[in-house]
């Protein structure tokens, strides 16, 4: 039975049966960390027996206590001038209840403040820029987080108040002050100037005291109040002695100084008034004086030195004059001058004399007055004006605007009529008037740029004369410009028109434009435009320069018009009836044409001669004699030779080109036709190629005449081709391959070679015979029909390939036509061999730590089958093995798939591996895998982990063992599981026993210095390499009460606001006690207070000092300052008491009244107000005493400023009403007092900006207007409207429009011809436009808005109306053109004349008529140029083209202007299109050139040439040519760029030869170009014929190895038939000449190796043994021989090195040794030895000792057996016998055993 030894309370219970102790109540480590009690176990015997065991239960800490700051808030003061990283304060939270990581505290700050905190110590430090003037305090939160698993947190609100330092220099508001002061200012008078300074260190609560000083420049005349900065006069002043003072000012705070200057300018005192230097003034000025022109100078004197005088015009002549005053005279500073200037435009004709008055005023407002008389001087500023002459006769009419005769200049006009026959003399007299006076009004007359020899004018009287007789035909209307010029300077002119209308007389005969006319017309009157009848022949035009009926003409033929064949009307000649050229006796008509005018009383006539030629048209079809011709030729008929065809002709009865014939074949594949109609073959005729055409070719031959349109006749020609035997049989391939299974039976047909041969001849010409030339060993039979039969059985292993040389020949021409091929017969394999492993059994040792996917072994199996049956696949068929091992199916590698473990899993595995080929033949081998042990288990610590021990600090004594660690190791003895212990590093006063693991103290530990220590302990086994495990023993030191509480400071100070209410915390103490638990708990109390009333005012709450009663700064009963004495006592046993500390608390007064505004109103300002102008003033008040109010604009946008002290609002920039954001401003005006804390109030002020007329109107879209107007546009038409915009408000945007007239040059002024509506801006013309007279008008228009004006320029272009018809100068055209004319080549140009301009001369040309497709060759441009559209003309296809050309003139006229004679087309409801058309015929004759290149008759000419031959004819190149001019002569040459080609060609017949011997191995195929060049007229033309010459082979190259020597390494374990390496040789020859076989010539006498004769693979024929020195290396001479005749050979050496394989186990030797019984540990008792026949690593040995039971151990490498434990006792055991094992290091590892006594 189990029971507790005592019955006192504990939170545990025990099961009396099982002894299981459980927790029965809450366990709190902070109350009790270690429980110890006795447990008694009693048996049930009689008497009952019992025993007691001590149970110690350590309570493990959990993180259940957060860190705690001693207070919630912390106030700290900190100087703004502190350097970076300076310590601000240190905060500290405590977590005394938890232990370990749970009580480790880290600190952090979460705010973006210029402070950082040390995460371990809680030191808050400066980490950024601070400035008291920018920000006076910072508030942030400090977090204390413990390091427990579930982190617990406490926060502390920290306020850092910056301490203001004197770090700013005081500054004056201005660096320079200026003040004007009267010179009679009295001593002590204060200057009315505000001099202020500020210091950025000043605050609302702390004002820096500033002191002001004058340091120089005052000359004792001025002083300054050091506190108010008021400057006063300190001595008498005199401007005449010292006019100004520049005073140096300084302002100082406690340590810094600011500077400024004050300029005081003394102002003179006025004592006398101004005096004019004349009692009156008289001035003269020209009436054209410019504004600002000087008129007269006025001077006045003021005896007061430098006393300024202002001048005012009290009578200014309605503003026409102005005065400029205050112009000082440097030579007489007491005198002042003024200038009278012109201020407006003057006009003598309106006002001649001005009476003005001027007043002079000095600065004392003293005045003097003087009169001024201004006389205007006349200038010549009025033009003469033409009037009706009162003395003129009645036959002269006058108009002020001569619209009827001239609409361009709008000038006055005189009109008269006069007979053409009248004698020279006086015509009329002109008359003018002028507003000017004297010489400026005197006019002189002249004529402007007319026929001076025809007219003259009297310069004084204005009488106009003609000195020459009139000629109505030369000029019937004379418009003369008369100019009147006055005598003024500058001279002004006026212009008038004199229109003299000359009446006509019939005094001229009709005259034809040429004396002889030549016209042509086609018979039947046919023009090849749809073959319609056209009567038009031509136009013979006469002219009569007389007017009216005198100039009207009629026409008639007076001779030569036989049978009235032609009719003439208005000069246009037409055909009366159809003409037939063949029926006419003469095809040319000779006619006389007469023109007569319309004057019946005095008739005039004129004659011209007209020749009309009747032209032929093409109306006869070419005709052949026969409708079909038949001819027969054989297939070898020569190329290019004419084929005779009897009766083969064609004829055409038409003339010239209409009778010229052109021949064309329907198919030119084999034949072509000459220009004379003869047929010839163009390529070699091959009967077999054209067999598909039934051995006959039917051609359609056409004969086309050269008419337009051309006429065509045709006939059929049938050409039959006869076959000849001209082709031999040819194998399709040079090498033929057949496959046959080695199981094929004899007499089986293998191949029918007739299917592999072609012969393009037919019937008996294509019979063939076959023969085997070589390669037959009697296995095959080939009959003459090409059937190949197997005669015996095949064996692939004996002979895998047979090569037969087969001949085929033509049965009729066997000698001439033969071909050879190589038939390659490949014997296919059958599966008849089983795969075999190189060993029947395999023993493979594998260390247990071999990693998964490691390759353990590679098996080798061989199969003599090849191809499909030969490849071997490997597998394991044991399901129990597959989870552990697998084998790669292709390369036979054995792979570990899961980890091995010697200790827990199988120590050996046995299974079979299989090798299977594709025919399912299978071989197998037995495999045993031995798992060997390695030291792969580290020691394992036992017991409850982790280790945790608690010892109180007063029990830590040197030598005390307080804990023992224990371990286990799964590895095998003797060394892999032998354990040693050690402490890893020096962590404290501890030591561990290396064998037992017992840990002891070596010294005492202080809980306050170290509360917990982790002791790192390592356990290491004796394996190789040794493995180790580390753990920690956690030693928890429990506390003893050995530390007193400690205040953080001996005294504290705190300031609190009078507004603080109880029970607020006014201060938080920092007290620490390094003890823990109750030993570290303490209580703080107030032991004494000064004065005593403070004891009731403050109480202690933990570490917080709280306010316990209301306080009032103003209440006298409230102590302003309290000093409290404090004491702390801990709860330990015995209790410990702290030393005392004091806390001084001071109550601070507060600001509690806000400032307020006086009433103010919103205001308005004009937009043209300037910057720094007064807007309004704001005032405010504050009930608090001594509170200073500061004004500011909270939402300032930079438009306004406000005085901080006076509230005056001024502008800070200019305004623009037109910018929307400038129109209204809502300012938030704020006032703030300087109390603590400061109080502020804000209120909105609205300032509205009013518009003023400050923007001129702007023309839109721009100031340039440009329009087009048709001539004769009605006067009432609004031509355009000018439009303006104005950014000002509507009231300021009213615009008036006017035309700006040119007063200087009115005659040339276009503006006088136009008016503009002043309101709408509509512009109209006063006169009709006439483009022929003037086509451009330019004038300005003015837009006026009050005083704002803008000018725009108007440009009017007068457009033309169509009133002229185009005239074609040539009725027909003829041109010659080379057939190779390129695209855009000019054929000719149609000349057209049209007197209109612009679109009215829009002449268009169009080609019409001709044969289908003719128009596709030509085109005509917009300017009438006929040109080649595309370069596709061909003289061989067509020689003459006749093209119709239509010329059109398009114009557009209003619908109302249409007459019956107009040929019109509807455009829209107001406009119609007028079309005038002229037709001409264009005949184009082509000129033949050499434009056809020769044509190669074959796409590729191929030939064969055996290598090493010279000057052999290879092939013949043939080409043909279509051109007739070039003839059939063609020259052949090798293309020059192929100069490296070793061939030559005969130039006249195209035969190709080789010049040198060629080598197939250097180049097998030659491809190049042969040129076929005709002999046509330059340039000659060339065809490029493709040539391919193939070189056939000759055995002339030895095989060449790819290496000079071969080196191979081979393991001695390589099985027979295993691969050693591969050699390879190449032969540049082709076919059998390039096939290589290999064999050994020497060095393989023992037959260890073999070589594949075809592939060159070297394999192992007999095993090799590395241990045999004669078999460690081999040198073999190998030869490579080709299969050519005679065969060629090459040789090289093979070097084979045999590598050692671990195939010998080590042999252990018995070992006997002696050792003293008192030998020490490590003494060598015996050395183990063994031998191994292998070498290198395979003979590196390792020794293992078994059964020593820890008494001995062996050095694994040297074999030395050492004493492990010095407990030998000779008397007990005299001999020790053990078994040892020796293993080599090879793979697989081999071992053997022996005994060691």
Image: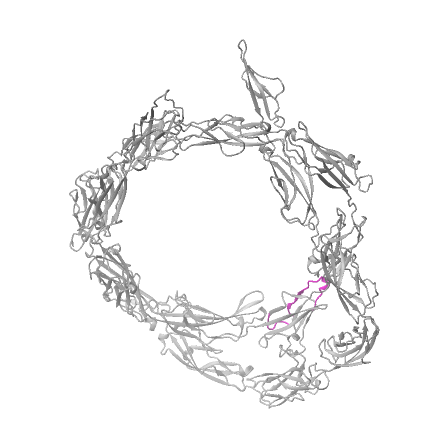
Tell me how many marks there are.
Answer: 0
Question: Which residue occupies the foreground of this view, 1425 or 1203?
Answer: 1203
Colour scheme of the rendered structure: one colour
In the image, residue 444 sits, relative to residue 1458, either above or below, namely below
Question: Which residue occupies the foreground of this view, 1527 or 470?
Answer: 1527
In the image, residue 1588 sits, relative to residue 914, either above or below, namely below
The picture quadrant where one finds residue 1588 is bottom left
Residue 1279 belongs to magenta span: yes
**What span is in magenta?**
1268-1296
Residue 897 is situated, as x and y percent measured from the top left of the image, at 38, 33
The picture quadrant where one finds residue 362 is bottom right
Is residue 138 visible from the viewing direction of this image? Answer: yes
Q: Is residue 1228 left or right of residue 1600?
A: right
Residue 1761 is situated, as x and y percent measured from the top left of the image, at 35, 29
| Residue drawn 63% across the image and 40% down it | 122
Q: Is residue 530 left or right of residue 210?
A: left
**Quadrant containing the C terminus in the rendered view:** top left
The picture quadrant where one finds residue 483 is bottom right
In the image, farthest residue toward the top: 46
Residue 5 belongs to magenta span: no
In the image, residue 1009 sits, relative to residue 517, either above or below, namely above
**Quadrant containing the N terminus in the rendered view:** top right
Residue 505 is situated, as x and y percent measured from the top left of the image, at 56, 86
Residue 378 is situated, as x and y percent measured from the top left of the image, at 73, 82
In the image, residue 873 sits, relative to residue 456, either above or below, namely above
Question: Which residue occupies the foreground of this view, 668 or 972?
Answer: 972
Is residue 701 visible from the viewing direction of this image? Answer: no
Q: Is residue 825 left or right of residue 1468?
A: left
């Amino acid at each position: 039975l189990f029971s507790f030894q005592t019955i006192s309370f504990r939170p545990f219970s025990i099961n009396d049966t099982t002894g299981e102790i459980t927790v029965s109540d809450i366990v709190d480590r902070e109350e009790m960390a270690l429980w110890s009690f006795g447990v008694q176990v009693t048996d049930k015997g009689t008497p009952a027996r019992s025993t007691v065991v001590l149970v110690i239960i350590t309570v493990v800490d959990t993180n259940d206590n957060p860190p705690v700051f001693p207070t919630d808030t912390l106030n700290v003061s900190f100087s703004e001038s502190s350097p970076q990283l300076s310590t601000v304060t240190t905060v500290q939270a405590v977590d005394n209840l938890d232990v370990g990581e749970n009580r480790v505290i880290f600190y952090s700050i979460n705010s973006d403040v210029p402070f950082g905190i040390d995460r371990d110590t809680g030191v808050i430090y400066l980490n950024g820029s601070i400035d008291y003037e920018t920000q006076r305090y910072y508030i942030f939160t400090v977090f204390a987080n413990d390091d427990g698993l579930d982190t617990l947190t406490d926060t502390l609100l920290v306020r850092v108040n910056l301490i203001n330092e004197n770090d700013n220099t005081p500054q004056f508001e201005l660096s320079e002050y200026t003040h004007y002061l009267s010179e009679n200012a009295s001593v002590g008078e204060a200057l009315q100037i505000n001099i202020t300074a500020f210091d950025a260190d000043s605050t609302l609560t702390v004002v820096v005291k500033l002191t002001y000083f004058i340091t120089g420049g005052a000359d004792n005349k001025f002083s300054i109040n050091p506190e108010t900065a008021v400057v006063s006069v300190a001595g008498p002043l005199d401007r005449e002695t010292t006019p100004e003072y520049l005073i140096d000012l300084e302002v100082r705070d406690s340590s810094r100084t600011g500077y400024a200057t004050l300029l005081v300018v003394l102002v003179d005192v006025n004592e006398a008034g101004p005096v004019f230097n004349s009692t009156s003034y008289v001035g003269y000025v020209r009436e054209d004086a410019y504004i600002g022109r000087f008129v007269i100078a006025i001077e006045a004197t003021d005896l007061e030195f430098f006393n300024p005088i202002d001048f005012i015009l009290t009578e200014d002549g309605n503003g026409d004059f102005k005065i400029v005053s205050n112009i000082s005279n440097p030579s007489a500073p007491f005198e002042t001058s003024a200038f009278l200037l012109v201020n407006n435009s003057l006009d003598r004709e309106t006002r001649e004399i001005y009476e003005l008055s001027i007043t002079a005023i000095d600065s004392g407002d003293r005045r003097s007055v003087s009169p001024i008389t201004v006389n205007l001087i006349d200038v010549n500023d009025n033009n003469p004006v033409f009037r009706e002459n009162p003395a003129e006769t009645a036959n002269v009419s006058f108009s002020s605007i001569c619209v009827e005769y001239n609409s361009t200049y709008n000038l006055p006009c005189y009109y008269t009529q006069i007979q053409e026959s009248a004698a020279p003399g006086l015509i009329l007299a002109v008359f003018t008037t002028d507003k000017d006076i004297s010489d400026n009004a005197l006019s002189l007359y002249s004529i402007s740029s007319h026929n001076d020899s025809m007219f003259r004018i009297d310069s004084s009287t204005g009488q106009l004369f003609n000195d020459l007789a009139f000629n109505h035909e030369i000029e019937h209307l004379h418009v003369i410009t008369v100019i009147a010029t006055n005598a003024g300077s500058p001279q002004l002119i006026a212009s008038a028109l004199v229109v003299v209308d000359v009446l006509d007389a019939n005094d001229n005969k009709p005259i034809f434009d040429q004396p002889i006319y030549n016209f042509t017309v086609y018979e039947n009157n046919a023009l090849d435009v749809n073959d319609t009848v056209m009567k038009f022949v031509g136009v013979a035009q006469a002219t009569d320069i007389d007017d009216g009926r005198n100039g009207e003409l009629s026409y008639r033929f007076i001779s030569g018009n036989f049978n009235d064949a032609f009719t003439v009307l208005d000069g246009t000649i037409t055909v009366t009836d159809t003409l037939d050229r063949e029926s006419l006796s003469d095809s040319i008509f000779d006619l006389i044409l007469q023109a007569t005018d319309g004057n019946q009383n005095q008739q005039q006539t004129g004659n011209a001669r007209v020749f009309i030629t009747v032209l032929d048209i093409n109306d006869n079809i070419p005709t052949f004699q026969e409708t079909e011709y038949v001819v027969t030729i054989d297939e070898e008929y020569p190329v290019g030779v004419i084929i005779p065809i009897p009766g083969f002709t064609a004829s055409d009865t038409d003339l010239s080109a209409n009778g010229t014939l052109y021949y064309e074949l329907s198919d030119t594949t084999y034949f072509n036709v000459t220009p004379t109609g003869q047929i010839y073959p163009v390529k070699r005729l091959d009967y077999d190629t054209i067999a598909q055409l039934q051995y006959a070719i039917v051609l359609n031959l056409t004969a086309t005449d050269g008419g337009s349109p051309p006429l065509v006749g045709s006939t059929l020609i049938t050409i039959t081709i006869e076959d000849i035997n001209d082709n031999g049989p040819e194998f399709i391939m040079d090498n033929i391959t057949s496959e046959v299974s080695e199981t094929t039976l004899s007499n089986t047909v293998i191949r029918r070679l007739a299917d592999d041969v072609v012969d393009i001849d037919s019937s008996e010409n294509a019979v063939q015979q076959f023969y085997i030339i070589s390669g037959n060993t009697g296995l095959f039979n080939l009959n003459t029909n090409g059937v190949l039969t197997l005669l015996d059985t095949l064996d692939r292993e004996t002979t895998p390939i047979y090569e037969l040389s087969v001949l085929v020949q033509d049965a009729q021409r066997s000698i001439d036509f033969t071909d050879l091929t190589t038939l390659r017969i490949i014997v296919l394999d059958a599966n008849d061999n089983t795969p075999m492993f190189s060993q029947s059994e395999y023993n493979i040792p594998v260390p247990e730590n071999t990693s998964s996917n490691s390759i353990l072994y590679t098996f080798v199996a061989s199969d003599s089958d090849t191809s499909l049956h030969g490849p071997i696949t490997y597998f394991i068929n044991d399901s129990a093995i597959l989870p552990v091992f697998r084998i790669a199916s292709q390369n036979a590698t054995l792979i570990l798939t899961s980890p091995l473990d010697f200790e827990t899993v199988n120590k050996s595995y046995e299974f079979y591996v299989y090798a299977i080929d594709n025919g399912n033949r299978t071989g197998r081998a037995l495999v045993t895998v031995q798992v060997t042990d390695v030291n792969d288990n580290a020691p394992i610590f036992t017991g409850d982990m982790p280790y945790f021990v608690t010892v109180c600090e007063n029990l830590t004594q040197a030598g005390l063992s307080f804990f023992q660690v224990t371990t286990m190791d799964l590895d095998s003895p003797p060394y892999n599981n032998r354990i040693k212990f050690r402490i890893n590093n020096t962590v404290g006063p501890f030591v561990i026993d290396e064998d037992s693991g017992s840990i002891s103290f070596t010294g005492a530990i202080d809980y306050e210095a170290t509360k917990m220590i982790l002791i790192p302990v390592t356990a290491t086994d004796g394996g190789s390499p040794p493995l180790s495990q580390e753990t920690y023993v956690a030693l928890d030191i429990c506390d003893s009460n050995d530390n007193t509480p400690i205040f953080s400071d001996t005294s504290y100070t705190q300031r609190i606001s009078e507004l603080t209410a109880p029970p607020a915390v006014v201060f938080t103490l920092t007290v620490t006690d390094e003890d823990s638990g109750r030993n570290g708990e303490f209580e703080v109390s107030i032991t004494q207070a000064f004065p005593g009333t403070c004891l009731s005012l403050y109480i202690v709450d933990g570490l917080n000092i709280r306010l316990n009663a209301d306080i009032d700064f103003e209440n006298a009963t409230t102590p302003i300052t309290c000093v409290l004495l404090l004491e702390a006592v801990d709860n330990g046993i015995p209790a410990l008491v702290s030393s005392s500390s004091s806390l001084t608390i001071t109550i601070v007064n507060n600001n509690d009244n806000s400032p307020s505004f006086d009433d103010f109103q919103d205001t308005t300002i004009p937009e043209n107000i300037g910057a720094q102008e007064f807007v309004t003033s704001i005032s405010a008040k504050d009930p608090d005493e001594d509170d200073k109010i500061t004004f500011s604009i909270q939402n300032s946008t930079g438009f306004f400023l406000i005085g901080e002290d006076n509230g005056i609002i001024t502008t800070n920039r200019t305004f623009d009403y037109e910018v929307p954001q400038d129109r209204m401003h809502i300012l938030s005006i704020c006032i703030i007092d300087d109390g603590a804390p400061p109080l502020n109030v804000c209120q909105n002020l609205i300032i509205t900006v009013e518009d003023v007329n400050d923007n001129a109107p702007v023309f839109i879209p721009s100031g340039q207007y440009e329009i087009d107007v048709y001539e004769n546009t009605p006067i009432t038409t609004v031509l355009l409207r000018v439009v303006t915009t104005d950014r000002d408000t509507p009231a300021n945007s009213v615009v008036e429009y006017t035309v700006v007239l040119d007063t200087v040059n009115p005659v040339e002024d276009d503006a006088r011809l136009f008016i503009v509506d002043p309101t709408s801006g509509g512009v109209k013309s006063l006169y009709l436009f006439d483009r022929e007279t003037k086509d451009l008008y330019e004038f300005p228009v003015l837009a006026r808005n009050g005083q704002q004006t803008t000018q725009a320029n108007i440009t009017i272009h007068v457009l033309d109306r169509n009133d002229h018809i185009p005239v074609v100068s040539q009725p027909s055209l003829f041109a010659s053109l080379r057939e190779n004319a390129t695209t855009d080549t000019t054929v000719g140009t149609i000349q057209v004349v049209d007197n209109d301009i612009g679109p009215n001369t829009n002449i268009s040309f169009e080609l019409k008529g001709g044969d289908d497709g003719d128009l596709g060759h030509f085109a005509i441009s917009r300017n009438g140029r006929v040109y080649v559209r595309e370069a596709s003309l061909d003289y061989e296809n067509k020689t003459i083209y006749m093209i119709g050309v239509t010329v059109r003139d398009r114009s557009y006229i209003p619908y109302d202007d249409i007459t019956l004679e107009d040929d019109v087309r509807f455009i829209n409801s107001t406009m119609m299109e007028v079309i005038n058309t002229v037709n001409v015929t264009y005949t184009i004759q082509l000129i033949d050139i050499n434009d056809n290149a020769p044509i190669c008759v074959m796409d590729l000419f191929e030939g064969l040439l055996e290598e090493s031959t010279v000057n052999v004819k290879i092939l013949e190149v043939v080409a043909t040519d279509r051109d007739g001019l070039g003839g059939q002569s063609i020259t052949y040459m090798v293309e020059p760029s192929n100069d490296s080609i070793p061939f030559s060609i005969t130039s006249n017949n195209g035969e190709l030869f080789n010049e040198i011997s060629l080598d197939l191995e250097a180049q097998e195929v030659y491809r190049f170009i042969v040129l076929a060049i005709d002999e046509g007229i330059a340039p000659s033309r060339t065809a490029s014929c493709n040539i391919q010459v193939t070189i056939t082979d000759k055995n002339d190259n030895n095989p060449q190895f790819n290496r000079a020597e071969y080196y191979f390494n081979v393991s001695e374990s390589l099985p027979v038939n295993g691969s050693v390496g591969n050699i390879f040789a190449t032969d540049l020859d082709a076919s059998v000449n390039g096939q290589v076989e290999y064999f050994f010539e020497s060095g393989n006498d023992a037959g260890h190796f073999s070589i594949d004769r075809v592939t060159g693979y070297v394999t192992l024929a007999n095993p090799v043994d590395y241990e045999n020195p004669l078999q460690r290396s081999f040198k073999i001479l190998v030869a490579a021989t080709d299969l050519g005749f005679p065969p060629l050979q090459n040789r090289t050496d093979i070097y084979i090195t045999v590598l050692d394989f671990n195939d010998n186990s080590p042999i252990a030797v018995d070992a006997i040794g002696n050792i003293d019984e008192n030998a020490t540990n490590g003494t060598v008792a015996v050395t183990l030895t063994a031998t191994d026949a292998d070498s290198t690593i395979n003979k590196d040995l390792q020794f293992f000792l078994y059964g020593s039971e820890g008494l001995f151990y062996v050095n694994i490498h040297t074999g030395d057996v050492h004493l492990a434990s010095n407990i030998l006792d000779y008397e007990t055991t005299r001999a020790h016998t053990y078994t040892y094992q020796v293993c080599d290091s090879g793979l697989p590892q081999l071992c053997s055993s022996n005994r060691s006594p």
